[in-house]
Image (cartoon, rainbow, N blue to C red):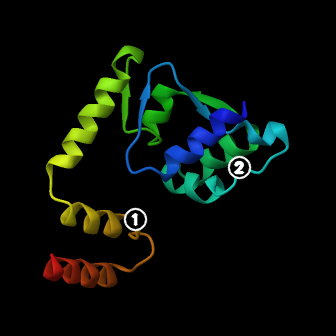
Amino acid sequence: MGRRWRRLQIALACDLSVASEDAQIGWPAIMEALIPGMGTYRLPRFIGLGRARRMVLTGDLIGAAEAERIGLLDWLVPQGQLDEKVRGVVATVLKGGQTAPAFSKKLVTRAFDFEFNDSLSLCLEFQRSH
């Protein structure tokens, strides 16, 4: 059981996520008398407070299709196509330059930390240095 919640913890820290259709996702940590670490911070930002509470407090596992629907997964593929899809996503990401995606990731990651005008100022600063 513990392996599944650690994988979710890692997935929440990743920029993009791909899973096979048969994946079961959740945090059964509560059933093991464990606190799911910083997932308690990250999970509500991905799926909202209500859904996060349900997953954290009950330890329920959800199917991959539901996880994709609520924003925990970016892509869902048949088991036999998982490696191919991951390679394709990596190839797509690597096609662009390094600077613009890095700055864009910083802006998106900090979107909830700033007011609009502060975000705009940071965006313009990044544009000038790009």
Label 1: state its secondary structure: helix
**114 to the left or right of 91:** right
Percent position of residue 105, x then y:
32, 62
Q: Position of residue 81 (x, y in %)?
A: 33, 19
Disc 1 and disc 2 in contact, CB within 8 angstroms: no
Query: Left or right of 123: which side holds 32?
Result: right
In this view, 22 is above or below 50: above
Check disc 1 and give the amino acid type: Thr
Q: Residue at x 66, y 34 (%)?
A: 3
The image quadrant where one finds the C terminus is bottom left
Q: Is residue 125 left or right of residue 61?
A: left
Q: Which residue is mark 1?
A: 109
Residue ranking furthest to the right: 33
The quarter of the picture where residue 114 lies is: bottom left
Q: Quadrant of the N terminus?
A: top right
User: What residue did someone put label 2 on?
Assistant: 36
Give the crowd class for mark 2: few <14, some 14-19, many >=20 residues within 10 Å. Answer: many
Quote the CA–CA distance across marks 1 and 2. 21 Å
As drawn, which residue projects farthest toward the top? 80
Q: Residue 96's spot in the image, x, y percent? A: 15, 53
Give percent across and percent down for residue 111. Answer: 38, 69
Residue for point 43% across, 38% down: 73
Query: What label sits on residue 101 in the rendered view?
Result: none
Secondary element at image label 2: loop
Quadrant in the picture for residue 29: top right
Q: Image quarter for residue 127? A: bottom left
| Tally of numbered tags | 2
